[in-house]
Image (spheres, helix red, strand yellow):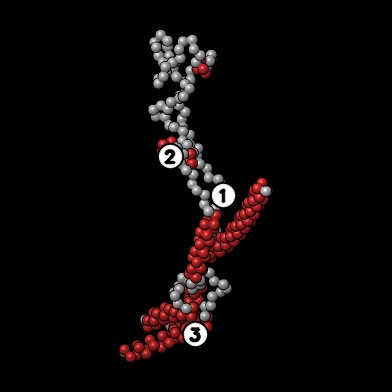
């Protein structure tokens, strides 16, 4: 009975271990599936971010950057080989290789004693001015001649969490870049209506200055009355209107915008074709009052 009970206990223990192993394998498989799903999701996010950054770059005139895929060529570290031949010692002069005694007479000298072979040292020493062969970067021994410990492998879950945080940070900066790209270079803090009003009013003011110059030129006889009236009623207002229209199209257009931004043509036409004649009338009234 004791043998049967021990056998039953051992069988239960093996069954429990088997079930624990199956549960562990299922949990590991589920973890791997989750890691693969998270990696695929991050890959899609990074691909979409790269495409959006290329669009933003093209909107401001920067071409899409290419990453070179060729292998980096690194020159191999070579060291000059030390001399392998040493002068044979003369028995009469008692010469011997430096650092050790030569072979006794009648004894085999190994590779050095073979006929037709030069005399070589079994362990060539590095001489003065020679360079030792460099070890690979990962094979450099630590202090005391013992190799250093290998770096610990990174946890995939931790790396994916860091990648997700970096992707979130990239999304935040991308949204800020899009908001900045939707603002024009000319008066970016102003509303479109206020920007158009300021541009057309400024162009009309320049036209009014030119009108005063033409009036002064007419006073000295350089410009006749018909030409002056034509420029005041049509020429200068038209020039100021088209100047404001072009300025809004060049500097009042955001770098990233869908469609054509409004230029408020009717507002500009009204301002320019009213401001110049009104300025002329104001000039005449001021001239009469001062005279």
Frontmost residue, 115 versus 61: 115
Q: Residues within 10 Å of mark 2 (few under 14, many from 20)?
A: few
Question: Of label 1 and label 3, which has the lower sequence position?
Answer: 1
Frontmost residue, 223 versus 27: 27
Q: Residues within 10 Å of mark 1 (few under 14, many from 20)?
A: few
Instruction: Using the rendered view, name the quadrant where residue 131 is placed.
Output: top left
Left or right, residue 223 beside residue 12: left
Instruction: Report, in whole angstroms, how far the alpha carbon at label 1 lies from the one at label 2.
Output: 35 Å
Q: Which residue is denoted by mark 3 in the rendering?
A: 270
Element marked by disc 3: helix
| Residue found 41% across the figure and 88% down from its top | 281
Instruction: Report, in whole angstroms, how far the alpha carbon at label 3 lies from the one at label 2.
Output: 84 Å
Left or right, residue 4 beside residue 184: right
Element marked by disc 1: loop
Q: Position of residue 184 (x, y in %)?
A: 48, 72
Question: Of label 3 and label 2, which has the lower sequence position?
Answer: 2
Work out which quarter of the rendered image holds the C terminus and state it.
Answer: bottom left
Task: Say if mark 1 contacts mark 2, CB within 8 Å.
Answer: no
| Residue found 47% across the figure and 36% down from its top | 135
Residue 142: mark in rendering: 2
Q: Is residue 200 visible?
A: no
Front label number (1 vs 2):
2
Q: Position of residue 108 (x, y in %)?
A: 51, 14
| Residue found 48% across the figure and 80% down from its top | 193
Question: Of label 1 and label 2, which has the lower sequence position?
Answer: 1
Q: Position of residue 29 (x, y in %)?
A: 63, 55
Frontmost residue, 142 versus 115: 142
Q: Which residue is denoted by mark 1 in the rendering?
A: 69
Q: Is residue 44 above or below residue 243?
A: above
């Amino acid at each position: 009975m004791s043998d049967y009970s021990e056998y039953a206990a051992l069988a239960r223990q093996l069954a429990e271990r088997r079930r624990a192993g199956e549960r562990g394998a299922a949990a590991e498989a589920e973890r791997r599936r989750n890691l693969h799903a998270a990696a695929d999701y991050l890959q899609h996010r990074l691909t979409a971010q790269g495409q959006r950054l290329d669009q933003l770059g093209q909107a401001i005139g920067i071409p899409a950057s290419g990453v070179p895929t060729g292998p980096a060529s690194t020159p191999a570290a070579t060291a000059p080989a030390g001399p392998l031949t040493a002068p044979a010692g003369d028995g009469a002069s008692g010469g011997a290789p430096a650092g050790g005694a030569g072979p006794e007479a009648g004894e085999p000298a190994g590779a050095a004693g073979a006929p037709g072979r030069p005399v070589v040292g079994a362990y060539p020493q590095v001489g003065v001015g020679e360079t030792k062969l460099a070890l690979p970067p990962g094979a450099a021994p630590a202090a005391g001649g013992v190799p250093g410990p290998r770096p610990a492998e990174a946890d995939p879950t931790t790396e994916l969490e860091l990648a997700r945080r970096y992707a979130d940070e990239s999304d935040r900066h991308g949204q800020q870049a899009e908001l900045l790209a939707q603002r024009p270079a000319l008066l970016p803090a102003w509303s479109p209506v206020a920007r158009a009003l300021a541009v057309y009013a400024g162009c009309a003011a320049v036209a009014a200055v030119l009108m005063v110059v033409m009036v002064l030129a007419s006073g000295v006889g350089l410009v006749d009355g018909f030409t002056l009236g034509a420029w005041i009623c049509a020429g200068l207002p038209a020039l100021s209107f088209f100047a404001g229209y072009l300025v809004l199209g060049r500097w009042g257009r955001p770098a990233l915008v869908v469609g054509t931004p409004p230029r408020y043509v009717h507002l500009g036409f009204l301002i320019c074709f009213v401001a110049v004649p009104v300025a002329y009338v104001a000039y005449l009234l001021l001239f009469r009052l001062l005279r």
